[in-house]
């Protein structure tokens, strides 16, 4: 019931549809730094997919019974957090099974998803139900101003940095997002 | 006794009540619209995100070491791309969210009995987003053009500015239509995908940008200096985009069953959009050409027109002019009072096309030279040279004295750049000790002597 209350089935269904759609799309790459780079870096389409999946996951943060959760005698919020975790794990599984992603690129895809989830959680705690705007703005700015010169990546373009930088950045973002959500839950209901 | 009640007929607002003079009605109506717009803008969820994107755009375009600085066309194109892809898609997604706000808040049944139609309800929700997006675009444009204006005077391609505003309107209207008809949670995602894929697809399909891609015209190439905007095509595209925006708002308004816009107005808007689409699609654009620009039939030679020496290049290389023009102004200030500075400098071969004498400066090492490189070229080209008659009996050039070599070193010092050459001249340390006026007098005399194959006068004691 809690899973339905935080729209987990819808989010999972939408995520599965997106994964199927991207698996069917041709292998193309999009430019990074369209207006600031003389020679834009190319971003494979499968690295955009995790950001879109994080955007889709925004309703997970908003329970239909958020006020009840905030005042419940039982620790309803733990179950809410667990539900989010289960959905994230399932989506990670779907992403790892993508047929058009090379095996050595799977860690980057997963890191991009987890980092984008972190950005979405940060957005949800600051912008409410418009929390998806944060990963969306990141994606759009990445493609337009994410690099300069001959492919020098901007410092904030964490998802396209080498995996040694991208993975810790993603985990840091996820930790920051989770902490922000937990802090918000402690103080008041997240109603958007 | 109860107070008399007044009923307002359907489709008529309170400010249109009979008995109120037309002038007062109009001003009251304008006041009401202003108040509504101000309230909607102030409370719009787009305010914070668009303000943030505007600040980021201004900072990024103001700080980046960029090739477009000084070129008004390319500056406008860069901001156009930023506005359409970043601000526009975010605005469209927020519009999709906002279009579903009355259903989410349970106000839909009330709005179905309103005195205005569904299109007006949609417009009230999303027009402030367009207003904010347009303001954001214009602010980023002002910041980028301000940076270009420091280097080079010019005007932006106005047709492109108008078209960008129209693209933003269409993106917001598309978001409104999708938001009105789709579930609230999925509408923004569908809008993002539609607007992003619509902008990217023409680039990946052969010939897409110059054919069907014109219907969603996000210009993603730069224009070389010989290209000019095609105002007729850009304004036609703007008209098409506005017609589609109106059509999409009417389509969104049909979601309010009780006050849906009439089919007649929908048909009229669809007809207008179809006709304007025809005007956009009919002009043929040859392969290799762009829809938004045409090749100008200009002069093969382009020259600076600011203060200082005139600098001329082949028109294909006109992109070097803005940085050279800035350097030429600084050079003119540093060489005030010197009579031997050439008035016209040119790239190799340009003097013949110009039909007047010009000093050859050679080719620059970079596509757009830095200020320092441009100043060094000006100093080198201004160094006094022996005249054409200074040829000895053995064919060797007479002149090129050691003292005259100090002149470029002094000019470099005045401009604050490393000495181009001549710092090792014996005359240089003594010349450095003189006042600017005495330096000028000696340099004029030395240059005159150099041209006439004579030895320059001795450097006076300080």
Image (cartoon, rainbow, N blue to C red):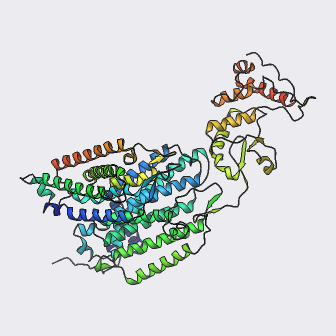
Specify the farthest residue to the left.
Answer: A73
For the N terminus of chain A, which image quadrant? bottom left
User: Could one spot residue A57 in this view of the protein?
Assistant: yes
User: Would you say A107 lies left or right of B141 here?
Assistant: left
Tell me if residue B169 comes above or below residue B74 in the rendering.
below
Q: Position of residue A134 (x, y in %)?
A: 33, 53
For the C terminus of chain A, which image quadrant? bottom left
Q: How many marks?
A: 0
Kindly indicate the quadrant of the structure image that contains residue B360: top right
Q: Position of residue B337 (x, y in %)?
A: 74, 32
User: Would you say B313 lies left or right of B35 here?
Assistant: right
Specify the farthest residue to the right.
Answer: B393
Tell me if residue B217 comes above or below residue A83 in the rendering.
below
Kindly indicate the quadrant of the structure image that contains residue B440: top right
User: Could one spot residue B34 in this view of the protein?
Assistant: no
Q: Position of residue B122 (x, y in %)?
A: 34, 70
Identify the residue shown where x is 43% and y is 44%: A154
Identify the residue shown where x is 58% and y is 44%: B150
User: Which residue is at the front of the view, B177 or B12?
Assistant: B177
Tell me if residue A63 comes above or below residue B411 in the rendering.
below
């Amino acid at each position: 019931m809690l899973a339905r209350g935080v729209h987990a089935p819808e989010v999972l269904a939408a995520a599965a549809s997106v994964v199927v759609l991207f698996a069917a799309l041709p292998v193309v790459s999009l430019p990074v730094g369209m207006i600031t780079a003389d020679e834009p870096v190319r971003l494979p389409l499968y690295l955009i997919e995790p950001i879109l999946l994080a955007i889709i996951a925004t309703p997970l943060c908003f329970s239909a019974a958020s006020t009840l959760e905030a005042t419940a005698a039982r620790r309803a919020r733990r179950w809410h957090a667990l539900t989010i975790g289960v959905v994230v794990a399932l989506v990670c599984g779907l992403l790892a099974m993508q047929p058009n992603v090379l095996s050595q690129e799977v860690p980057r895809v997963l890191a991009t998803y987890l980092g984008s989830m972190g950005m979405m959680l940060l957005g949800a705690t600051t912008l409410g139900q418009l929390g998806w705007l944060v990963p969306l703005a990141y994606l759009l700015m990445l493609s337009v101003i994410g690099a300069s010169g001959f492919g020098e990546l901007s410092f904030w373009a964490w998802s396209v940095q080498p995996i040694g930088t991208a993975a810790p950045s993603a985990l840091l973002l996820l930790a920051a997002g989770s902490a922000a959500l937990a802090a918000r839950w402690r103080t008041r209901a997240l109603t958007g | 006794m109860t107070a008399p009640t007044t009923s307002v007929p359907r489709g008529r607002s309170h400010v249109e009540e009979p008995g109120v003079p037309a002038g007062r009605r109009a001003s009251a109506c304008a006041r009401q619209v202003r108040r509504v717009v101000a309230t909607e803008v102030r409370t719009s969820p787009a305010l914070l995100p668009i303000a943030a994107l505007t600040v980021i755009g201004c900072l990024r375009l103001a700080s980046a070491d960029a090739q477009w600085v000084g070129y008004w066309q390319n500056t406008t194109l860069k901001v156009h791309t930023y506005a359409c892809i970043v601000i526009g898609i975010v605005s469209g997604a927020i519009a999709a969210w906002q279009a579903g706000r009355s259903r989410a808040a349970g106000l839909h049944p009330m709005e179905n009995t309103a005195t205005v139609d569904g299109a007006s309800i949609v417009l009230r929700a999303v027009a402030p987003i367009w207003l904010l997006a347009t303001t954001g675009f214009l602010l980023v444009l002002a910041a980028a053009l301000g940076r270009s204006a420091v280097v080079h005077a010019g005007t932006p391609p106005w047709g492109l500015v108008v078209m960008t505003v129209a693209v933003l309107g269409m993106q917001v209207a598309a978001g409104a239509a999708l938001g009105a008809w789709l579930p609230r949670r999925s509408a923004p995602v569908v809008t993002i995908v539609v607007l992003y894929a619509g902008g990217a697809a023409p680039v990946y399909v052969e010939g897409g940008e110059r054919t069907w891609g014109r219907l969603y015209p996000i210009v993603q190439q730069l224009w070389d200096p010989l290209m000019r905007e095609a105002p007729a095509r850009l304004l036609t595209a703007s008209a098409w985009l506005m017609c589609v925006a109106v059509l999409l708002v009417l389509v969104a308004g049909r979601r309010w069953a009780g006050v849906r816009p009439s089919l007649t107005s929908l048909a009229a808007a669809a007809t207008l959009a179809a006709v304007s689409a025809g005007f956009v699609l009919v002009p043929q654009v040859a392969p290799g050409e762009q829809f938004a620009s045409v090749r100008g039939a200009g002069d093969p030679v382009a020259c600076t027109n600011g203060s200082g020496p005139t600098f001329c290049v082949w028109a294909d290389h006109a992109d070097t002019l803005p940085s050279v023009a800035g350097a030429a102004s600084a050079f003119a200030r540093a060489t005030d009072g010197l009579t031997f500075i050439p008035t016209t400098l040119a790239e190799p071969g340009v003097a013949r096309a110009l039909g007047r004498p010009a000093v050859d400066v050679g080719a620059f090492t970079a596509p757009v030279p830095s200020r320092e490189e441009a100043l060094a070229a000006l100093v080198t080209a201004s160094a006094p040279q022996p005249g054409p008659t200074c040829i000895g009996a053995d064919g060797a050039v007479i002149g090129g004295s050691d003292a005259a070599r100090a002149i470029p070193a002094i000019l470099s010092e005045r401009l604050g750049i490393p000495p181009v050459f001549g710092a090792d001249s014996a005359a240089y340390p003594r010349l450095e000790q003189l006042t600017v006026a005495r330096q000028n007098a000696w340099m004029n005399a030395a240059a005159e002597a150099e041209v006439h194959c004579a030895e320059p006068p001795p450097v006076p004691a300080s």
